[in-house]
């Protein structure tokens, strides 16, 4: 008999929370590196900070991939599928990719000519403000780099494991409308070429679906689906923003 699996079941929820907790620790550790950036010596000190953060991304990314692999294995056992399978851990992002992300996050730190029309308002802020903004951006990109390793591990396992047939997105109750719109699509079969899309600070998880399992949307995702079908899908124009409005009006969006 087919067992059902959902984006809102206990294991999926615990995994999503564990990954979110991991990236909270990552951000806390990152903040302790703040002192590496010396405002009077940006040229010399920003690269030191980048190197330190890159090492953190390596450590936390491994932890994220391992957490995800353990979750996958436990789900596989719970699904009672046959045959052995070793979950390959997702590759970490390259040093270049991490550095580029961090350079992007810190690009407004550099002194610009305020008279230059190319200079943006963000670049005209005082340095302490620019530092706060750079750190915020860096935390968001790093969170994604780390969480992607966990998600990538589950996704790749589904692709390779003959006993896995699909994956589904598990979005938190507090997730944004973009993620909720993707979550209501339910199970994405492995022959589909759909990629998992995530934004910075996205804590969505991936639920593997095995042979013999039937995927069902959780009650909350079914409610998002109802709102989408009623208030967004039948209308022309920007359906995502209609969906967002419907979520807000029905109390399904966090107040930001
Ligand atoms: Zn998300």
Image (cartoon, rainbow, N blue to C red):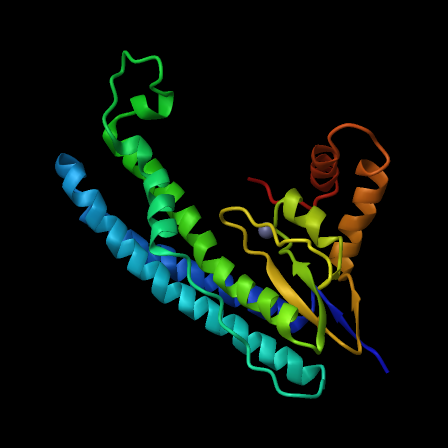
Q: Residue at x 71, y 37 (%)?
A: 240
Please state which of residues 131 and 112 is positioned toward the viewer in this rendering: 112
Compared with 151, 75 (above or below) is below
Compared with 213, 181 (above or below) is above
Please state which of residues 69 and 178 is positioned toward the viewer in this rendering: 69
> Which of the 4 quarters of the picture holds residue 119?
top left
* Residue 17 appears in view: no
Compared with 77, 202 (above or below) is above
Q: Residue at x 60, y 61 (%)?
A: 205
Across and down, in percent, residue 52 comes to 25, 56
How many numbered discs? Answer: 0
Q: Quadrant of the C terminus?
A: top right
Q: Residue at x 50, y 58 (%)?
A: 148
- Left or right: residue 232 versus residue 163 is right
Q: Quadrant of the N terminus?
A: bottom right
* Residue 40 appears in view: yes
> Which of the 4 quarters of the picture holds residue 5?
bottom right
- Left or right: residue 46 versus residue 80 is left
Q: Residue at x 60, y 65 (%)?
A: 155
- Left or right: residue 92 versus residue 186 is left
Please state which of residues 90 and 109 is positioned toward the viewer in this rendering: 90
- Left or right: residue 63 versus residue 51 is right
Across and down, in percent, residue 13 comes to 62, 66
Please state which of residues 136 and 68 is positioned toward the viewer in this rendering: 68
Across and down, in percent, residue 8 comes to 69, 65
């Amino acid at each position: 008999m087919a067992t059902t699996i959902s984006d809102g079941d206990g294991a999926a929820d615990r995994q999503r929370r564990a990954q979110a907790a991991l990236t909270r620790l990552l951000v806390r550790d990152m903040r302790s590196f703040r002192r590496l950036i010396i405002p009077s010596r940006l040229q010399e000190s920003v690269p030191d900070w980048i190197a330190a953060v890159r090492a953190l991304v390596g450590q936390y990314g491994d932890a994220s991939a391992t957490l995800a692999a353990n979750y996958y294995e436990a789900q596989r056992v719970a699904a009672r599928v046959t045959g052995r399978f070793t979950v390959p851990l997702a590759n970490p992002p390259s040093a270049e990719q991490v550095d580029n992300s961090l350079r992007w996050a810190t690009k407004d730190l550099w002194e610009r000519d305020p008279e230059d029309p190319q200079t943006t308002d963000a670049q005209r802020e005082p340095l302490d403000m620019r530092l706060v903004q750079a750190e915020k951006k860096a935390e968001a990109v790093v969170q994604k780099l780390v969480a992607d390793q966990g998600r990538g591990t589950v996704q790749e396992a589904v692709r390779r494991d003959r006993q896995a047939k699909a994956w589904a997105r598990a979005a938190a109750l507090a997730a944004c409308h973009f993620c909720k719109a993707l979550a209501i699509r339910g199970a994405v079969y492995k022959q589909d070429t759909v990629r998992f899309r995530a934004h910075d600070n996205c804590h969505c998880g991936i639920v593997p679906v095995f042979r013999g399992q039937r995927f069902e949307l959780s009650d909350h995702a079914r409610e998002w689906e109802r709102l989408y079908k009623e208030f967004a899908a039948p209308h022309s124009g920007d359906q995502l923003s209609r969906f967002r409005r419907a979520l807000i009006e029905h109390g399904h969006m966090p107040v930001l």
